[in-house]
Image (cartoon, rainbow, N blue to C red):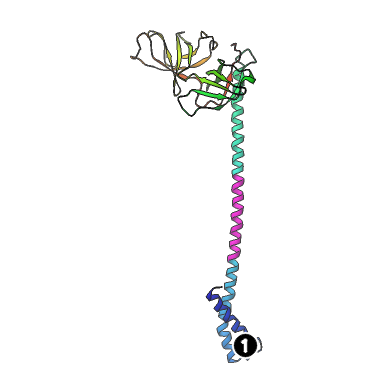
């Protein structure tokens, strides 16, 4: 108890004692001089004490109210966070279903039931390593050197790479952008032939194309089928740049943009036995 509170309490006791001493409350006109003096001194003090008590009570009620509001707000914040997480999960499931529906449409391009849809579950941190890990392996009938396709922005399937390693439930895929990748290719329009090699960072180059060859920007590049690995006619990419004036002797430097966005790919199709319609 503070010093001021003790003084107020003492004065209140004095007033009560004076009332008791003079026989309790009386008509104001019949009060003695001593009683009136006691009332004059003790009245304001008692009133102040009463109002102070009321103020403290109101302050306590206000504090308890704020505590309750804060608890309610915290519960609401938790509920909102939970609902936002559930909404994000639902949105992700919707997007995945949409991608899988598009992949199922791609499967109709092939006269076989052997294609396997797989999810990309791993990718090396090093940007120069052009490999991904998928969640299907030997159990699904996947073997090394099987072609791997992915969805392109325009609908048809595009070449992602080839299987280079297999475990029971997983497989490693070498992307066409990896420097160790090489695919026999054709310019679809002019039928010029070359070897599509990876250059890392999402780039490929079409090597061994004659300096006199008929090649234009945006020409479609497809698999030739001559490497006995990729069936003929699969989409590889588009000519994005022809380095005029930088021909290496007999050959023309041609840069090719892959048809599939390999940096953002999430699902792929592995072709176990392929025959185009």
Q: Position of residue 123 (x, y in %)?
A: 52, 27
Q: Position of residue 129 (x, y in %)?
A: 47, 24
Q: Is 233 in front, or is 28?
A: 233
Q: Quadrant of the C terminus?
A: top right
Task: Look at 60% across and 68% down and name the residue there.
Answer: 57
From the viewer's perspective, tell me whether residue 243 is left or right of residue 66. left
The reply to whether residue 151 is visible in this rendering is no
Query: How dense is the environment of label 1, judged by Cα within 10 Å: few (below 14), some, or many (20 and up)?
Result: few
The reply to whether residue 49 is visible in this rendering is yes
Q: Is 124 in front, or is 77?
A: 124
Q: Quadrant of the N terminus?
A: bottom right
Provide the residue designation for mark 1.
28
Q: Is residue 40 above or below residue 174?
A: below
Q: Is residue 250 above or below residue 17?
A: above
Task: Look at 37% across and 16% down and name the residue there.
Answer: 243
Task: Look at 53% across and 25% down and name the residue there.
Answer: 265
Provide the residue span drawn in magenta: 59-80
Determine the main secondary structure of the stretch shown in magenta: helix
Q: Is residue 203 above or below residue 80?
A: above
Q: Is residue 93 magenta?
A: no
From the viewer's perspective, tell me whether residue 238 is left or right of residue 89. left
Residue 214 sits in quarter: top left
Q: Is 45 in front, or is 272?
A: 272
């Amino acid at each position: 108890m503070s010093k001021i509170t003790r003084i107020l309490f003492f004065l209140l006791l004095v007033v009560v004692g004076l009332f008791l001493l003079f026989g309790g409350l009386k008509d104001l006109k019949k009060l003695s001089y001593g009683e009136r003096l006691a009332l004059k001194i003790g009245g304001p003090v008692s009133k102040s004490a009463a109002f102070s008590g009321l103020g403290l009570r109101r302050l306590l009620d206000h504090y308890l109210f704020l505590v309750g509001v804060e608890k309610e707000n915290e519960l609401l914040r938790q509920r909102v966070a939970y609902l936002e997480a559930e909404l994000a999960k639902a949105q992700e499931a919707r997007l995945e279903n949409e991608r899988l529906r598009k992949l199922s449409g791609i499967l109709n391009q092939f006269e076989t039931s052997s294609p396997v849809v797989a999810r990309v579950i791993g990718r090396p941190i090093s940007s120069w390593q052009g490999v991904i890990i998928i969640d299907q392996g030997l159990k699904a009938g996947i073997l090394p050197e099987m072609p791997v396709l992915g969805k392109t922005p325009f609908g048809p399937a595009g070449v992602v790479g080839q299987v280079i390693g297999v475990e029971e439930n997983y497989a490693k895929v070498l992307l066409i952008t990896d420097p160790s990748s090489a695919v026999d290719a054709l310019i679809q329009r002019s039928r010029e032939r070359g070897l599509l090699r990876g250059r890392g960072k999402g780039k490929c180059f079409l090597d061994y194309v004659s300096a006199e060859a008929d090649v234009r920007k945006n020409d479609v590049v497809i698999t030739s089928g001559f490497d006995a690995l990729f069936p003929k006619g699969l989409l590889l990419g588009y000519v994005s740049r022809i380095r005029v004036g930088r021909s290496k002797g007999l050959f023309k430097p041609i840069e090719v943009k892959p048809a599939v966005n390999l940096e953002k790919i999430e699902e792929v199709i592995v072709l176990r036995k392929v025959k185009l319609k």
